[in-house]
Amino acid sequence: MTTPPDTRPGTPLGTPLSTPLGIPLDTPDVLAAVRAGRTRSLPALLKPLDRARRRDLLAGLKELRGELRADGWARWEERDRINPALLVAGAACQSGAAAAASWIGGRDMRRRRRLPYDVLVEALADRDPKWLGDLAHRLAARPSTARDDYPLISELVRRAGCPVPTTDGCVEGWATSLRSSRGTLTHALRRDPHLRAFVPRLFETPEPVAPLARECEPDDPHQWPTALAALADEGFLDRSLLLDGCTARLLRGGTAPVLKPYRAILQALKPTEEEERGRTADWIAIAADAPSSVAGHAQQVVARLAAAGHVSAGRLAEMSAAVLFRPERGLVRAQLVLLGKALARDRAAAPELLPVLGEAFGHADTDIQERALKLAAAHLGDDDQALRAELADRAHLLSPVHRARAVEAFGADAAPDEDTGPYEEFLPPPPLPVPLAPAPETVAETVELVAAVVNSRTETVEEFERALDGLVRHAHRDRTALAEALRPALADRYWLDPERRHLYTGDLPGLEHVAAAVLDVRPAARPRQPLFSRRSDCHHSDAAVVRHARVAEAAQRIGSRPLPFLLATPTQSTGALDPQVLVARLAAYARLGETPAPADFAQALLRVRRDASALPEATALGTPEGDRLANWLGEGGRPAAVTRRTMPAEYQRFGGTPDRHALDTGERATVIAEFPEQFRSLGRARTAQGRCWDGGAPETLIALLPEDRETLAAWSLPAVTSCAVDEARDGTDILPGLAASGGPAGPALHLAVATGLGARHAEDRLRAVDGLLTLAGRGELDAVRLGADLTELVDLGTVKPSRLADALRTAAATGAHATTWAVLAGLLPALLTGSADPRGTGELLETAAECVEQSRAVSPCPAGLAETAARPGRSRLVTQAARLRDALHRNGADPKETP
């Protein structure tokens, strides 16, 4: 008899097995079949083995599995050949269903290839039906694999004769398996044995199962809604179950795409009037809270029921109170129409229905306010004094443009008390710079912080800088003690693993580079290429090179002459460095006889706040570095000039888009002449190109140049513009930080904020609004300049007025009415006189009118406003122009228009 192969870890596959492992010699055929990947031969080989022999064989299979895990991807072809057989053999050798389910669910044996379910079922055929049912339910309870294992679970359930498990994964697997059947979906559902068990669960999963979400057109005969409706008509499914499931799922809420399949099933079922009437409360609740498309459907159902006399006035009032509070104009208008019809049918319903119109008085759309006001006035009787008083009490919510009509309809009580005091702008408080905590005092604190930063996916500027300074300080004081504490904390790093240290080339990112120097870990090979390479069109790569230069310098000095501390460690969380603190640090270096490290000092200069009051102290140091600091605080550190130009579409890297603004930065002679080579790209003139796609944390980039936000804004403008023109995402993430950092807030930053206000996605616009409000809160916003920038951007097509209206409406909603109006006052003339795209102008006028009414601003009427307000018709453009004109006149504006 041949000796079975050895399966001990570290032993090459195929080595003969020594008998001390305890595996009986009558199992070599099974192990050999597993190693050869002969999966289909295993059931016959396993069948003669009793429980004891299978238990012994399992030990060898576990060792083989451990060996394959340890090898990782080194022998992936061999592993992929062995894994299916290993899974089948191991499952068949398990005595308990829990252990078998755990073995079958092992992700390391399920890569790349479909599991051989038919062979696995055959290998388990000799098990007790109760055991098979237990296994099926345990497999179904594994969320990560239940969907893929549904064919196996279904067959185990059939053999065990037990109820099918209906976990979320099984529902997904069941729905997916139906499409692998021949014939139509309706035919597959009709003959499926588990139809009635799974269909109710379709409405209970957190998200719609993928096949249902993918195939949910209500009129397509080959998709789910029509198939389920057909089975309900044939009696295979209960219509009430489907209707209740759909309405319950819509009541649970979710986004419109999530709810679309359930709405489609409702449409395919075509509920009768009696079925809709029995669920009136559900339709009312859905209309109140669901996404607008779903709420609109429920609103239409209630309208039909109300027209047929099946909705009481109380129910309709309950629904209206919720719907009229919603921001969607279409839903609110439709609800007002529904109320008007109900009042026309039944005058006696007025006491219950009219009070809810007060909810619409506070709507953002003044047209809706007007409709609600007219509806209330039309249905108030002479003897309805209580109703009149109740509505008058809510009239203060109306726009000033409607208050005269409210007094006419409800009496003098509807006139609000006039606020004669001065307007006070309520701006959100700008973020205050947070002082950076000092470096960790002890070795233990330093090691804890270093380990946290190294193992974190996202690090803050404060964490990185404190950890780096702590490593440098404690390596200078006692490198041996630091190394002893640091080694166990970083034991999981590959460059400390004896078996993988040969991969270490000496280039590690961030703190690991310094930690390796502390631990005296030498590179085992040369790097194939630099860890960070510079690209001429990418400021992120320049920032990465600079950052790594600091780290590499600190690591090199630890091995030669450790620095006592770092000069460039910021004093604020933005990355800024107080000039008096830098002077004190340079003085301490002079007392210690230390020479500043070039990269560290260069970064310190880029971070120092340019305060001329510190210039005499820097000069008094009497050192070369003190003189360089004094020069930098004077003319030497002046930011580069920024030049604006228009980049035609045909010259853009990503063509096919409108012309766009570009910002070129000039040269910084001091950086080029005196800074280390790695820093000089920051001082070279840069011509704006397309968006840099390398990315990077905005806080890290700002911490590189925390006192030069004009340069950073110029470099970031292509990414911000892509959010407006190319519909990219996250290009505006740097704007709030730039607005809160140091240096002049000049044309580049204002142009970047203006461009961000027209971003495609709401979250990007919100960041631009944050930047605008931060500048305003710090007294740095030039509203005239921002308005002029917006005029140019709208004219170029970079910013769409409708998106801008949403952003400025958000800014005004924070209380910044005067600020928002100051911006809009410079933009509106171009929109009203036809020199820019007029689409969305009505929304901008609405925001402008709201701001003028709230801030009681006194300013001339924008050019073209009077002509627009005098146009015939009732469009939003005309009505909001008239509202703005009247508001300005009420505030005492000069009737002459601004040019």
Image (cartoon, rainbow, N blue to C red):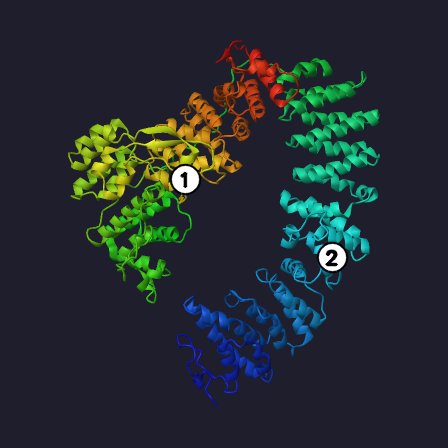
Label 1 SS: loop
Category of crowding for the residue at label 1, using alpha-carbon neighbours closer than 10 angstroms: few (below 14), some (14–19), many (at least 20): few
Q: What residue would you read off at disc 2?
A: 186
Amino acid under label 2? Thr
Q: What residue would you read off at disc 1?
A: 653
Q: Can you tell which quarter of the image residue 644 is in? A: top left
In the rendering, at what x and y percent does residue 706 appear? Answer: 34, 35
- Is 817 drawn above or below residue 90 in the view shown? above
Q: How many marks?
A: 2
In the rendering, at what x and y percent does residue 873 appear? Answer: 66, 18
Of label 2 and label 1, which has the lower sequence position?
2
In-front residue for pair 624/156? 156
- Is 227 drawn above or below residue 340 in the view shown? below
In the rendering, at what x and y percent does residue 246 appear? Answer: 72, 48
Callouts 2 and 1 close, C-beta under 8 Å: no
Residue 313 horizontal side relative to residue 508, left or right: right
Residue situated furthest bottom in the rendering: 1
Category of crowding for the residue at label 2, using alpha-carbon neighbours closer than 10 angstroms: few (below 14), some (14–19), many (at least 20): many
In-front residue for pair 320/420? 320
In the rendering, at what x and y percent does residue 545 appear? Answer: 30, 46
Residue 687 horizontal side relative to residue 626, left or right: right
Label 2 SS: helix
Whether residue 311 can be seen here? no
Q: Can you tell which quarter of the image residue 660 is in? A: top left
Q: Residue at x 46, y 75 (%)?
A: 63
| Comparing labels 2 and 1, the label whose residue is closer to the camera | 1
Residue 226 horizontal side relative to residue 626, left or right: right
Cα separation, mark 2 vs mark 1, equals 51 Å
Q: Can you tell which quarter of the image residue 19 is in? A: bottom left
In-front residue for pair 385/596? 596
- Is 607 drawn above or below residue 140 in the view shown? above
